[in-house]
Amino acid sequence: MDDFLAPHSTEAVAHSRLSEDWLDWDISGPSFDESLVAHCASYHAFDRYLSGEDLFIPPRFPSELEQVLRRHAYDSIHNAISRSRQTLKTGGYSRTCHLAEQSIRSVLDTGDNARRLLAWHRPS
């Protein structure tokens, strides 16, 4: 995982914070933390992809890979929203999804990450 998201990256820090403070992460601020949830969702999407969880047909192209990662991120966002005791501000869901998508694209566009991720589940 560190090859794609360094331990000090925004995504890894968000994941760590939510993992450590799962019971009260949502009440520590005045409103739903869209950025925290989005970056954690991005981290979780890559983690879930790398583990092969729920991956029945591996992606063959970068566009398919991005779609798989987006679906994983949306699942994570939905889970966080359902557990949160804070309400989303108007447009919050769209902003959170957009931030997660930007994060995913950024990782895929860095170096040869997309190629390496596509090869991760390719049969030898």
Image (cartoon, helix red, strand yellow):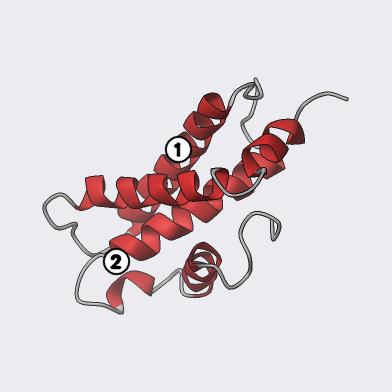
Looking at the image, residue 124 sits to the left or right of residue 84; the answer is: right
Q: Residue at x 34, y 52 (%)?
A: 99
Q: Gap between marks 2 and 1, in whole Å? A: 19 Å
Counting every numbered tag in the picture gives 2
Indicate the quadrant containing the C terminus: top left, top right, bottom left or bottom right: top right
Q: Nearer the viewer, residue 28 or 120?
A: 120
The quarter of the rendered structure image containing the N terminus is: bottom right
Which residue is the extreme one toward the right? 124
Q: Which residue is labeled 2 in the image?
A: 33
Question: Looking at the image, which residue is at 58% across and 73% down?
Answer: 8
Vertical position of residue 59 compared to residue 98: above or below: above
Question: Mark 2 near mark 1, Cβ–Cβ under 8 Å?
Answer: no
Type of the residue with mark 2:
Asp
Q: Which residue in the rendered view is the most extreme toward the left?
A: 90
49 shown above or below 63: below
Q: As shown in the figure, which amino acid type bears the numbered disc 1?
A: Arg
Horizontal arrangement in the rendering, residue 64 relative to residue 38 (left or right): right
Neighbor class of circle 2 (other Cα within 10 Å; few <14, some 14-19, many 20+) is some
Secondary structure state at the residue bearing disc 2: loop
The percent position of residue 67, horizontal first and vertical second, equals 48, 30
- Determine whether 9 is above or below 59 in the image: below
Residue 35 disc label: none
Q: Which residue is mark 1?
A: 70
Residue most extreme to the front: 111
Q: Residues within 10 Å of mark 1 (few under 14, many from 20)?
A: many
**123 left or right of 86 in image:** right
Identify the residue at horizontal 25%, vertical 51% (top origin).
Answer: 95
Say which label, 2 or 1, has the lower sequence index: 2
